[in-house]
Image (spheres, rainbow, N blue to C red):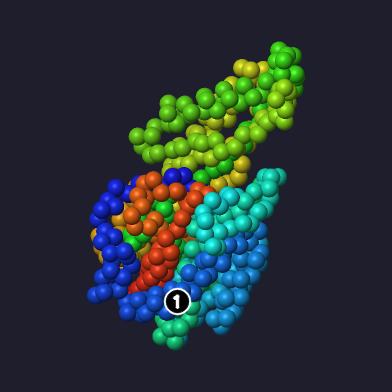
Amino acid sequence: MRHARLFAVSLLATALAAALPAAAQDAATQRPEVAAAGQAVQQQVIDWRRHFHQYPELSNREAETSKRVAEELRKLGLQPRTGIAHHGVTAVIKGGKPGPRIALRADMDALPVTERNRLPFASKATSTYRGETVGVMHACGHDAHTGILLGVAKSLVAMKDQLPGEVLLVFQPAEEGAPAGEEGGAELMLKEGVFKDFKPEAVFGLHVFSSIPVGQIGVRQGPLMAASDSFTLKVVGRQTHGSRPWGGIDPIVAMADIIGTTQTIVSRRTDISKLPAVVSFGAIKGGIRYNIIPDDVEVVGTIRTFDDGMRQKIFADLKNVATHVAAAHGAKVEASVPDNDGNPVTVNNPELTARMLPSLQAVVGADNVITPPLQMGAEDFSFYAREVPSMFFFVGSTAKGIDPVTAPSNHSPEFMLDEASLDVGLRALLQVTLDYLHAPRD
């Protein structure tokens, strides 16, 4: 997930009276086969998650992860399709009875983050990102998503004779975004026909989040997560000696001025009383030596919005600011705003979400299913949601006794997932699946 700090949960005192999962259950409504599956595959899901955590791979580079997922699916007697959108894997579980078709999605890629947790299965992996050697870590929890979906697959296969309908398992690469110059993620999965021969009538997905305590689930009807766009600005000046700045055009000073002025786009030019918006810079590169003013400086950043009109206006404002501020310094700017098509807003189908809300409540209890505010983090699950009715929900991952407001967030090198969240995620996704498939048809 392209993740800003997510919502703070102020109701930590509500729940978690028991260290979770089992004590929080509503035994009268949770399907007995869901509880049984949770018990049966719990350790296997933990083992899968730890393996993927220890051996993470960056977006569009998930070769070994994909291979392992396909191997596990074959062990279940399934026939996985591989190589979709580079390293995507899909498989279909066919129930023994007629019924609807649905899809379940998990993302598999990791982030260019060096892990700082002292775990026996901590990542020591490195790779290359934007031309630099970086650590690689599942700092956003995609290792958990992959393990959970494998657990759901194993549980569904065990009951497939009594299962109505069919389930498409979608193990997706590159949710965090393909490297520059490459395609990837959900958009490429769809482009390469993930739904061509199997068009589901609903798609479900989940995400573990540090900002929710373990034992709680967050879900919201309608818009949930922001549209996400990346941009690149390159200021071109003229190189000179640091002792003679008048002999050239300083792109560093010009870029600093652009960065500062850009802050007024949201604070002074965007009607944030309507919907929130964010413009942030993520990296700046320029120069090589302390006494040389370089020829150019480049920055990259992100724009988050919930309204297409606001989105387009921010694009125009950013180009305008960059062009005119650079010109004021005698420099030129090369502006790529946005760099690509970006992710649309993630929207939960209101009717589907209302219908499946009792399924989530059955797993953790009604008091532990919360409605989060709009999230500035983004998800390319949004591309599936544009194709068919979809529901995406959050699974709390911060351990009892730790304030989720101050816990290291997703994308942090200290992101720490309480493995009890794996059980919650497994049972929630399985309950949703079974409730949907077994529901009476009109």
Q: Position of residue 217 (x, y in %)?
A: 35, 59
Seen at 66% across and 64% down, the residue is 63
The answer to whether residue 8 of the structure is visible from this angle is yes
Q: Is 419 above or below relative to 2?
A: below
Q: Tag 1's secondary structure?
A: helix
- The residue singled out by tag 1 in the image is 41
Q: Is residue 110 left or right of residue 435?
A: right
Q: Is 397 above or below relative to 90?
A: above
Locate residue 27: give its quadrant.
Answer: bottom left
Seen at 27% across and 51% down, the residue is 11
Seen at 31% across and 64% down, the residue is 19
Which quarter of the figure is the C terminus placed in?
bottom left
The answer to whether residue 176 of the structure is visible from this angle is no
Q: Residues within 10 Å of mark 1 (few under 14, many from 20)?
A: some
Q: Position of residue 314 (x, y in %)?
A: 50, 34
User: What's under tag 1, amino acid-wise?
Assistant: Val
Seen at 38% across and 58% down, the residue is 399
Q: Is 240 above or below relative to 88?
A: above
Q: Position of residue 67 (x, y in %)?
A: 64, 70
Q: Is residue 172 left or right of residue 220?
A: right
Q: Is 129 above or below relative to 218?
A: above
